[in-house]
DNA sequence: AACACGTGGCG
DNA sequence: TCGCCAAGTGT
């Protein structure tokens, strides 16, 4: 049950309990999201579908709400339940995930669905420990699903909440060392009657008010007791260790086409960068300066014509790819790969870097066309 | 404990 | 144009 009047009043006077004004703000200003149950429903005990909460949390890892929405809708349309996802073809899941990035998330998503369906009777565990034992679910997601889908008193800490807390308490310790202290601050502020709404309120605050740059402190519901607001130093937090410079790697990509417009594709190895995704044949990606006119890595001899270059930035390196194109006979063999017809190409499990390479050689080839 | 792991938007 | 950054996890 909720706290007594007296304890709420006492808590609000303390800089360490900001949960009541935060929740009051959330009740009025929460974002409307496809996977979310609004506070007027959670307040009467209506909780969101754990499958949808879990799916959204996996998609939202290091990914913006705007990027996730259309993927989320497509996934729940194709696979409305965890059992449906468990029964899906992994290749179809990778195709549906293509473009979202961090592809190990999709592989683990599928494994997790299979485990929940086979070993948990299709129901997600409601505890942090039970959830964290599943593939692709770490500290954050275990706490978030437990709190949001099951209203368990879990201390949820994501990037938004790290920012809010380090500002509230002017925590000078750099991330990730500050993580334990942040977790402790969240745990002591956690309102046990509304843990799910509290987590989502903190994230909404971080996403819309307590933003990385130009925080809107004048609109913030918890400025009372915020030390960074008092000092005018909010934008300094969180303190982070300096990041290392990104190396540049170079390589070549080969877009082979047939007379009917089909493009030669192949599958990458299941592990590592872009693991299990689809690609056009290419060279290794190395730091070497050559490659601009180097077709020695071509999958077979052909009249390879330079078709431009593309640049793509990954998390820990930048890539410059020289793109070559050649027309092959209609009966040319596909080797380890396959010929993808023009109407199939947009639906392939092509990561963005590969779509860029193909677009450089054949403009428009990977774009989904509306049927007319 | 570091490092690998994608992508698109924003100032 | 370019660096920063977004609801992190696995190894």
Image: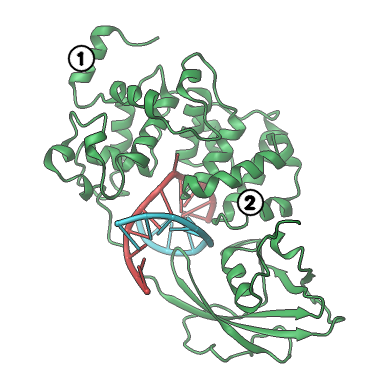
Chain colours: A green, B cyan, C red
Residue at point 18%, 19% (across, down): A13
Which of disc 2 and disc 1 is earlier in sequence?
1
Read off the residue under disc 2. Answer: A107
**Residue projecting furthest to the right:** A331
Q: Residues within 10 Å of mark 2 (few under 14, many from 20)?
A: many
In this rendering, is residue A91 above or below A18? Answer: below
Residue at point 58%, 79% (across, down): A284
Residue at point 21%, 44% (across, down): A234
Residue at point 26%, 13% (across, down): A8
Position of the C terminus of chain A by quadrant: bottom right
Read off the residue under disc 1. Answer: A10
Q: Residues within 10 Å of mark 1 (few under 14, many from 20)?
A: few
In this rendering, is residue A155 above or below A331? Answer: above
Q: Judge whether residue A136 can be spotted in this image.
A: no
Residue A60 percent location from the top left of the image:
50, 45
Please identify the quarter of the rendering in which residue A48 is found. top right
State the separation of the CA atoms marked 1 and 2: 48 Å
Position of the N terminus of chain A by quadrant: top left
């Amino acid at each position: 049950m909720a706290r007594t009047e007296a304890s709420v009043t006492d808590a609000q006077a303390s800089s360490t309990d900001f949960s009541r004004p935060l929740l009051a703000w959330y009740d009025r200003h929460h974002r409307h999201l496809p996977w979310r149950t609004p506070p007027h429903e959670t307040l009467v005990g209506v909780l969101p579908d754990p499958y949808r909460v879990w799916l959204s949390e996996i998609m939202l890892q290091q990914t913006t709400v705007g990027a996730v929405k259309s993927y989320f809708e497509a996934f729940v349309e194709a696979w409305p339940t965890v059992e449906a996802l468990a029964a899906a073809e992994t290749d179809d899941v990778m195709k549906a995930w293509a473009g979202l990035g961090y592809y190990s998330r999709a592989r683990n998503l599928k494994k997790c669905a299979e485990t929940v369906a086979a070993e948990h009777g299709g129901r997600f565990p409601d505890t942090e420990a039970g959830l964290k034992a599943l593939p692709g679910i770490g500290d954050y997601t275990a706490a978030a699903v437990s709190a949001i889908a099951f209203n368990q008193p879990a201390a949820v800490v994501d990037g938004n909440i790290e920012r809010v807390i380090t500002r509230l308490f002017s925590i000078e310790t750099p991330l990730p060392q500050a993580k334990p202290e942040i977790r402790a601050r969240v745990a002591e502020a956690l309102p046990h009657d509304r843990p799910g709404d509290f987590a989502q309120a903190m994230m909404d605050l971080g996403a819309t008010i307590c933003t990385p740059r130009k925080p809107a402190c004048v609109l913030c519901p918890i400025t009372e007791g915020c030390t960074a607001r008092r000092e005018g130093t909010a934008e300094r937090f969180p303190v982070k260790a300096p990041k290392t410079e990104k190396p540049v790697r170079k390589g070549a990509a080969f877009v082979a086409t047939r007379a009917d417009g089909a493009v030669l594709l192949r599958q990458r190895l299941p592990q590592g960068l872009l693991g299990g995704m689809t690609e056009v044949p290419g060279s290794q990606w190395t730091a070497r300066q050559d490659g601009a006119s180097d077709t020695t890595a071509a999958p077979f001899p052909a009249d390879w014509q330079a078709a431009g270059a593309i640049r793509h930035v990954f998390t820990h390196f930048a890539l410059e790819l020289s793109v070559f194109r050649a027309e092959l006979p209609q009966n040319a063999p596909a080797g380890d790969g396959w010929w993808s017809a023009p109407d199939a190409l947009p639906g392939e499990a092509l990561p963005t870097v590969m779509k860029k390479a193909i677009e450089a050689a054949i403009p428009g080839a990977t774009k989904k066309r509306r049927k007319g």
